[in-house]
Structure formats: structure tokens, C-alpha cells
Image (tube, helix red, strand yellow):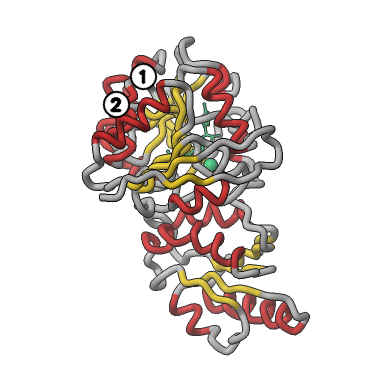
Amino acid sequence: MDATPRLYASTPLRLNHTIETEVLAIDSAAPDPGVIARAAAVVRRGGLVAFPTETVYGLGANALDADAVGRIFAAKERAADDPLIVHLADAGQLATVAREVPPLAVALAAAFWPGPLTLVLPKRAEVPAAVTAGLDSVAVRVPRHPVAHALIATAGVPVAAPSANRFTRTSATTAAHVLEDLGGRIDMVLDGGPAEAGIESTVVAVYADGVSVLRPGAVPTEAIAEVVQRADPAATIRTGAREKVSPGMMAKHYAPRARLTYVTGPREAALARVRALVAEELAAGRRAALLLSDEDLEALADLAPALTASLGPRGDHTTAARRLFAALRELDQRGAESVFAIAPETMTGYARAIDDRLRRAAARVE
Ligand code: TXA
Ligand code: MG
């Protein structure tokens, strides 16, 4: 396999120097231990390594090194009040970052780790304030992706990793997306091909008496509810924050350059609304784009001059999740000025997460 480094450099706007970003190809199914060892060494010496996970690409640094964590915020131009997820090699290390692990957290970890679930728990003092944006809680996840797992295990430290995109932009689901946003700003990218789910982990705050789903994600909310109910039939299951809203949940996120209109409601009415809006755009000479299922694109085929991007077969939320962020980036690259998407018809599986991301990417929700 080709592990020859390719170097990538760009001139970032707000950093005073450019660094060389080494790109190493890696087999996602069977990561080369030599490549992993090089990446782990970068993490241990305080550098930044982007790597694939089963959700999206992460931008990793040693979570116990406040300077390294500071570099994540600088590279992404991320607001300092938006806390990071700490990634562990296995659930056994939970006590090194979390000061308390309520029984519901134990049940959720047993059900979904390794995997795309993030638990928000009371933090230990050893976790730098920079990681948690000064909060008394820490978000923790044990990823399932073999490259992510091998990197964290070999580095031997917890790895703080946000999604590997510029702040407020669409999450990166390929190494090319990472380079587009962060080339010249980070030390290394492990290119293991496209991320599997395409949508981020589900973030769940866990309390003694219940849970709050803070961010819908790759573990469906109904699957979380089932495990919580089984573990404690009296537990409460909320969506949204119990106290103050996590800064990362703020609206201005995942935004493409093009102006996104997200149309909700019954399908026929939504299609009619998109048809009218897009016809208006085209008449005004603007480059409008449709981000829809194959069936919906077919139904609007008469809007021929519009750019199109397919989210896959209608109702196939797994394919839609995998394609969503890449499609938004691609439409930007093709020069779309406005993008039109319609809401999933049933909120099962990844649909809730897709709906959440489109709402937050949208300039207008109808
Ligand atoms: O799938 C994922 O979760 C990816 C991969 C790389 O693991 N990571 C990711 O990180 O999406 P990021 O930084 O883009 O999103 C982390 C989310 C943010 O919305 C943040 O506000 C929330 O987790 N979060 C982190 N720490 C928190 C805390 N202590 N309390 C509440 N929310 C927290
Ligand atoms: Mg993110």
C-alpha cells in the first residue's frame, strides 16, 4: 500500500505561518502499524493529526496537553467556548477523564461502545479547561473505526478531536475535505477513505435520573431511549439541553457558502414549494441547486437548468447521511448560489440527525 507522504501547504488567513501537512494513505480495515506509530508520535509530541472515524474525520491532539488542544482551536478557528470530545481507546479508561460514571452511562457505553455515541459526564480535574471550554463536564467517546482505535491506543493518551473542518463549516467526510479546510494548518492527515456514517456521533448528557440527547447523530435517539428504559424504567429521556445549551449546538453550523433553503412538511407540498422557489431563482438568473432523493430529483426533472446532487433512494437515510456533507461541499464547488433540500418523511434511523444538520446549515427553514 502507498504510504509515501504527500505534502500539502496553503496560506491560512489567521495563522502567522504555514506548516507542511503530511498525507499518509492507510488501509481502514487493517491499518499499517508503522503508519499508526508515526501518527501516534505526532500526537504525543503535541501535534495535530486528522484521522477517519466511523462518523466523520476528526482532528486529534493529546487531550491532556493544553497547548496541543489550543492548536486545534487555532487551526479550525473554532470559538474557545465550544468544547471538544475526548476519544478513548476503550471504555476501561473512562475513569481517567470522568469523575463519576452514573449507571445509565455504564448501560449506554455497554450498548454502543465502541461506536458513534458521545457521553457527557462530570469531568476530572486532569482534563484541561481548554478541552471542555471551562465546563465541569467532559464529552467522551470510544470510536469503533480501526484507524481511530489504533491511533488512540498507540498514542497511549486520550485524544481530543472535533470534526476536522473549519469552524461552522460542513464536517469533513474525506481526507480531501480535511485538506480543503485545514491543509497547511495541521501536521498530518491519515487518509483511510470516506468516513462510514457521514454524520457525527449522538451526544448524550447522562445524569443519575435520566439522559438528554444534546445532538442527534449516528446512534438513533430511539435506540438510546430503548437502552435507557431497559436500564431504568423510571429514567427521563429528554432532547435538548437540561440547563444551558452547549455552545456547539448553536445554529450557525454546517453552513455551505450557498444559501440553503430547507423545506419541511408533506412531500407533495414540499416538492411544489421547491419547484416554485427554484423556478424563481432560475428566472432571476441565479445558479440554483437541488439536494434531494433520486425520486424527488426525478419529480423535479423539468427544472433542468438547476444543478443537482442526489442523496440516494427516497427514504434511504443511511445513504443520505453518507452523502450529505460531501454533496454540500460539491455544490459549493460547482458554483451553486442557492440550494434547496426537503425534510425526511420519517424520523427514523439517521433521519433525525440529517434533519438537525440541514436545519442548522439552512439560511431559511420553511
Ligand atoms: O462524531 C463525532 O462526534 C466527531 C468525531 C471526530 O468523533 N466529532 C465531532 O466533534 O463531531 P465536534 O467538536 O464537531 O462536536 C462536538 C459536539 C459539540 O456540539 C460540542 O458542543 C459538544 O459535542 N460537546 C463537547 N463537550 C461537551 C460538554 N462538556 N457538554 C455539552 N456538549 C459538549
Ligand atoms: Mg463539528
What mark, if any, has residue 101 been given in the picture? 1
Q: Is residue 266 above or below residue 8?
A: below
One can see residue 347 in this view: yes
Q: Nearer the viewer, mark 2 or mark 1?
A: 2
Q: Residue furthest bottom?
A: 302
Badge 2 density bin: few <14, some 14–19, many ≥20, Cα 10 Å: some
Q: Where is residue 147 in the image (x, y as percent from the top left)?
A: 30, 39
Please report contact status of discs 2 and 1: CB closer than 8 Å, yes or no: no
Mark linked to residue 154? 2
Tell me if residue 245 can be seen.
no
The amino acid pointed to by label 2 is: Thr
Across the whole image, how many numbered discs are drawn on residues? 2
CA gap, disc 2 to disc 1? 25 Å
Residue 54: give x, y in percent of width and height: 35, 46
Q: Is the residue marked 2 within 8 Å of ligand 1, measured from its CB?
A: no
Q: Is residue 51 left or right of residue 78?
A: left
Residue 227 percent across, percent down from the top left: 30, 38
Q: In this view, does 219 lie to the left or right of 245?
A: left
Q: Is residue 110 left or right of residue 10?
A: left
